[in-house]
Image (cartoon, rainbow, N blue to C red):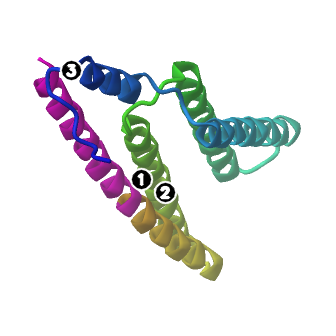
């Protein structure tokens, strides 16, 4: 059996429609629902801690504020993907990759600066861990860009064959 499709056939148009109209897979939906629940849970816990501990040092309050922004960002991302419900041709992975790079970079820089200011070994260890996560998120972002480019090329090729 061959995968070749006659360029002028309605079968090609049906194939393109199937590629672009697919809904998110069950696995992707469950993953994004889990992300939504985890980020909302994180937001609630950190907000409760921040609200019930008004005597926290300013550094801790700023750190908790940053954690709230991160949690809300991931929750917003999950809602966006879940509400769209169709495949996003890997664009959602680019958005998630950019967020991951930004947040891990912020964490690594903050812990590095904190370690330099305080001389804390724990902060230096956290900065090292943040640097590892930053490198991993950069690699995942590069992979997402490659996949997005590949899918866009495939889509353009199919559209040329139809049009």
Which residue appears at 43% of the width and 59% of the height? 137
On screen, 31 above or below 139? above
Which residue is more in the foreground, 4 or 37? 4
On screen, 72 above or below 111? above
Secondary-structure class at tag 3: loop
Question: How far apart are the two marked residues, 3 and 1, measured between alpha carbons?
Answer: 44 Å
Q: Where is residue 47 in the image (x, y as percent from the top left)?
A: 77, 36
Q: Can residue 119 be seen in this view?
A: no
Which residue appears at 48% of the width and 24% of the height? 86
Q: Do the residues labelled 3 and 1 touch (CB within 8 Å)?
A: no
Q: Are marks 2 and 1 in contact (CB under 8 Å)?
A: yes
Q: Position of residue 18 (x, y in %)?
A: 40, 25
Q: Quadrant of residue 53?
A: top right
| For discs 3 and 1, the disc positioned in front in the rendered view | 3
Left or right: where does residue 42 sit relative to residue 84?
right
Which residue appears at 58% of the width and 38% of the height? 74
Question: How far apart are the two marked residues, 2 and 3, measured between alpha carbons?
Answer: 48 Å
Q: Between disc 3 and disc 1, whose residue precedes?
A: 3
Left or right: where does residue 41 sit relative to residue 110?
right
Q: Between disc 2 and disc 3, whose residue precedes?
A: 3
Secondary-structure class at tag 2: helix
Packing grade of label 2 (10 A; few <14, some 14-19, many >=20) is many
Secondary-structure class at tag 1: helix
Left or right: where does residue 99 sit relative to residue 158?
right
Question: How far apart are the two marked residues, 2 and 1, measured between alpha carbons?
Answer: 5 Å
Count all numbered tags in the image, as a single digit.
3
| For discs 2 and 3, the disc positioned in front in the rendered view | 3
Say which residue label 2 marks: 104
On screen, 131 above or below 22? below
Find the magenta span and give its range: 139-163
């Amino acid at each position: 059996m061959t995968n070749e499709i006659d360029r002028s056939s309605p079968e090609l148009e049906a194939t393109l429609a199937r590629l672009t109209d697919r809904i998110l897979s069950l696995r992707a939906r469950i993953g994004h629902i889990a992300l939504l629940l985890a980020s909302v849970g994180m937001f609630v816990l950190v907000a409760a801690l921040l609200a019930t501990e008004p005597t926290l040092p300013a550094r801790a309050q700023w750190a908790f504020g940053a954690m709230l922004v991160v949690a809300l960002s991931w929750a917003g991302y999950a809602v966006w993907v879940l509400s769209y419900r169709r495949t996003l041709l890997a664009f959602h992975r680019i958005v998630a990759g950019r967020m991951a790079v930004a947040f891990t970079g912020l964490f690594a820089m903050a812990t590095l600066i904190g370690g330099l200011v305080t001389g804390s070994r724990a902060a230096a260890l956290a900065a090292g861990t943040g640097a590892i996560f930053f490198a991993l998120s950069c690699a995942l972002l590069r992979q997402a860009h490659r996949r997005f480019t590949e899918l866009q090329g495939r889509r353009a090729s199919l559209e040329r064959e139809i049009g």
